[in-house]
Image: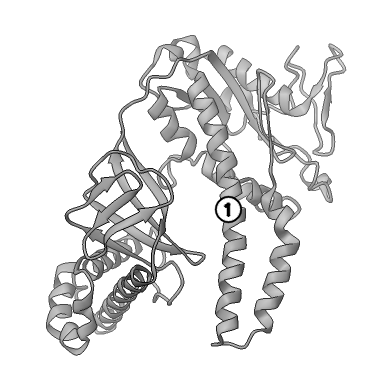
Amino acid sequence: MLLGFQTQLILNHKQTTLAAQHAGVARHAYNWGLEVCRQALENQQKLPTAIDLHKRLVAEVKQAHPWYYQVSKCAPQQALRNLEQALKRWRKGLGQFPRFKRKGVQDSFYLEGSIRISGNRIKVPIFGWLRCAELLPATTPKNVVISLRAGRWYISFKYEAPTPQVEKTGEVVGVDLGIHHLATCSGGEVFANPKPYRKARQRLARLQRRLSRKQKGSTNRKKAVVQLGKAHKRVADIRQDSLHKLTTYLAKRYRVVVVEDLQVKNLLQNRKLAGSLSDCGFYELRTPSRYRERRRLEYKARLYGCQVVVADRFYPSSQLCSGCGHRQKMPLQERVFCCPCCGLELDRDLNAALNLLRWYRTTPSSGGSDACGDSSGGVVGVNSAASHGSLKQEGSRSAAGTEHSGSVC
């Protein structure tokens, strides 16, 4: 399976300067090509391809800017290819029109050629041997991308990873996602929500105020920008770490994982819960097939031979009793499900996870127990709106002010 690997680079002053030069050349080539394309559109001419742009770049730009010859030719070439892809996406209606790149904002460049790996070092063209913060996989990548994030340089590449042999200890599990707890499994496992942004919100606000007081263009302002970027990166890293641990645990342990098809975009329209929902990072856990490439849980399911079954978006997992099937309204502030029919009292998240497990076992279209034998992994989407009825509404309008104790499902 083709996987991506990213790690931090430990560069000396000479290598840092060279990396900044490569990023600057790539940015200049991208902005120059974008201006040429804009002029072509204004004159109602055909958009030039990346090859056409590169020919003009060599003939016109490189002679006027000799510092182009101090970096690898791959940096401007790939920048023009990226511009061509962005324009194609814009013409297909998949994205906005490309914008000019700014210095210090998502700086990156592309290298290819003779690349070697030895332990925690990697040899790339122009730079030579670069030291990394961790051991690298034993492979020979064809190309790499070096990027700048919060004042630190990172290198990433793709490599073909062998399929690991993992012994499954569980068969089927229902997983309910929420805000109070990041995830609750039908087996009783609970994954805490680290809430990194909420914990760092005061510090981020303080750093932002310090930045606003600095004079534009000063050295102190540049230092403040880096400090604020590091604080935001720490928040993102904590969130990514918790999501990686959750998805790896599920994919390695169980043969079938049953989750809900959450429409995160619609959930974020609730202004009382939007901040907490964004802090959970549900989009990284699972993305519907009509949006970009499937993430985290899906690719790890294919890697470890697990199958992800997606329940219908309208299945009311939090409103049903996992014991008798009685349905009742469940406002977000109520954390315990109390069934008036059978007397069951259970945590609302655990009750929803058990309902997802029961839905899988009782819905013929979900695959039932036959799906457990599929060792190849993958995703199964099931539409059971006809059998399960109305949209799951959990009193989001009446949950004003319950952001801290709410649950998505």
Give the residue number, with chain letter if any, for mark 1: 236
Which residue shows up at 65% across the image and 77% down it? 211
Query: Residue 177, image x and y in percent?
Result: 65, 34
Q: How is the image coloured?
A: one colour
Q: Residues within 10 Å of mark 1 (few under 14, many from 20)?
A: some
Q: Is residue 23 visible?
A: yes
Which residue shows up at 36% across the image and 55% down it? 131
Q: Is residue 310 visible?
A: no
Query: Residue 40, image x and y in percent?
Result: 24, 80
Q: Is residue 320 above or below residue 48?
A: above
Depth check, front residue: 219 or 330: 219
Give the amino acid type for the residue marked by disc 1 in the picture. Ala
Instruction: Indicate the quadrant containing the C terminus: top left, top right, bottom left or bottom right.
Output: top right
Which residue shows up at 31% across the image and 78% down it? 28
Which residue shows up at 55% across the image and 79% down it? 222
115 lies left or right of 273: left
SS at badge 1: helix
Q: Quadrant of residue 209?
A: bottom right
Instruction: Indicate the quadrant containing the N terminus: top left, top right, bottom left or bottom right.
Output: top left
Q: Is residue 384 above or below residue 364?
A: below
Q: Is residue 367 above or below residue 50?
A: above
Query: Residue 249, image x and y in percent?
Result: 54, 27
Query: Residue 322, image x and y in percent?
Result: 72, 17
Depth check, front residue: 129 or 391: 129
86 lies left or right of 328: left
